[in-house]
Image (cartoon, grey):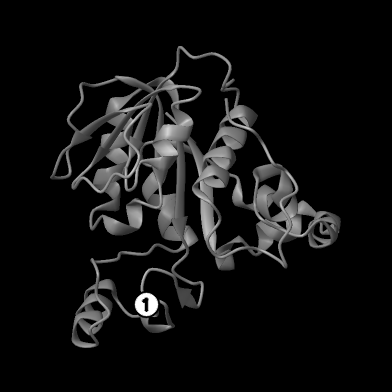
């Protein structure tokens, strides 16, 4: 099973936390919403396999099916992989107990369609873990450029191509747009505020002294300024 390291030292928040810590963060959030990792009967869909490392870690606890448009895996065991292109997920209605969409929706032009597909394949009362970067955060992490992503998505992506910085199209959301699009299919519970207040609880790489200071800030302050949080993390319930 996964060995948990709560107090991995660093000089502050890491810009690229390990895949293990990302998987542990997902596990911690799901546990808060009543999903006990010890109960292996949960069927989990991981959208956007990437390297497959997160799916492999989650496969220590759940039965995991992972899907992506291309196969970039460096990890192959512990989950079932399906390659599928197009916006429609290749699964029957109400197939999964949990859906994980970890930094995927910003790569999808039709965010509402992504939300609808997650709702379609999710069982009644199922949960979605969803994380995505904030459009209002001044640094765009995919391309390593500041402020340019404040432009309309079409213009932003065209300029990236002109500048030779384009990898794939990016469609970032503000907090208000994200919540509006998700609420059409789910109830939305914010988690980002708690992650900011108690980073070690969610396996963020943060020095314990900084974490202690962050814990002193009232939770309502983090909620008040959620619109400028670097990343939105939410749990969606069908």
Where 34 falls versus 162 (above or below)?
Answer: above
Please tell me how many numbered marks the rendered image carries.
Answer: 1
Q: Quadrant of the C terminus?
A: top left
Q: Which sits in the foreground, 7 or 179?
A: 7
Q: Quadrant of residue 4?
A: top right
Q: Residue at (40%, 35%) from the top-left corner? A: 55
Task: Give coordinates of residue 220: x percent, y percent.
Answer: 74, 55
Q: Residue at (57%, 25%) from the top-left corner? A: 1
Q: Is the residue marked by circle 1 packed among few (<14), some (14-19), or many (20+) residues within 10 Å?
A: many
Answer with left or right where residue 88 lies relative to residue 219: left
Task: Give coordinates of residue 85: x percent, y percent.
Answer: 13, 44
Task: Give coordinates of residue 54: x percent, y percent.
Answer: 44, 40
Task: Give coordinates of residue 158: x percent, y percent.
Answer: 19, 80
Most distant residue in the bottom direction:
163
Residue bearing the label numbered 1: 149
Q: Residue at (47%, 31%) from the top-left corner? A: 58
SS assignment at label 1: helix
Q: Residue at (28%, 38%) from the top-left corner? A: 116
Where 106 falls versus 166 (above or below)?
Answer: above
Answer with left or right where residue 214 lies relative to residue 139: right
């Amino acid at each position: 099973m996964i060995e948990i390291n709560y107090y991995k030292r660093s000089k502050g928040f890491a810009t690229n936390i390990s895949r293990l810590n990302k998987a542990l963060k997902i596990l911690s959030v799901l546990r808060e919403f009543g999903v006990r990792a010890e109960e292996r009967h949960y069927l989990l869909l991981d959208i956007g396999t990437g390297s497959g490392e997160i799916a492999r870690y989650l496969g220590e606890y759940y039965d995991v099916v992972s899907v992506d448009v291309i196969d970039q895996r460096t990890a192959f065991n512990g989950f079932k992989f399906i390659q599928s292109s197009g916006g429609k997920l290749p699964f029957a209605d109400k197939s999964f107990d949990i859906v994980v969409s970890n930094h995927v929706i910003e790569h999808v032009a039709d965010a509402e369609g992504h939300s609808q597909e997650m709702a379609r394949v999710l069982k009644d009362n199922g949960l979605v873990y969803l994380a995505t970067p904030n459009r209002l955060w001044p640094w765009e992490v995919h391309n390593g450029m500041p402020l340019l992503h404040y432009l309309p998505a079409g213009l932003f992506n065209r300029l990236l191509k002109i500048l030779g910085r384009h990898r794939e199209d990016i469609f970032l959301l503000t907090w208000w747009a994200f919540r509006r699009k998700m609420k059409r299919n789910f109830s939305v519970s914010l988690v980002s505020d708690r992650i900011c207040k108690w980073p070690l609880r969610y396996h963020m790489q943060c020095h314990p002294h900084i974490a202690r200071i962050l814990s002193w800030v009232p939770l309502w302050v983090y909620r008040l300024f959620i619109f400028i949080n670097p990343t939105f993390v939410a749990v969606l319930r069908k």
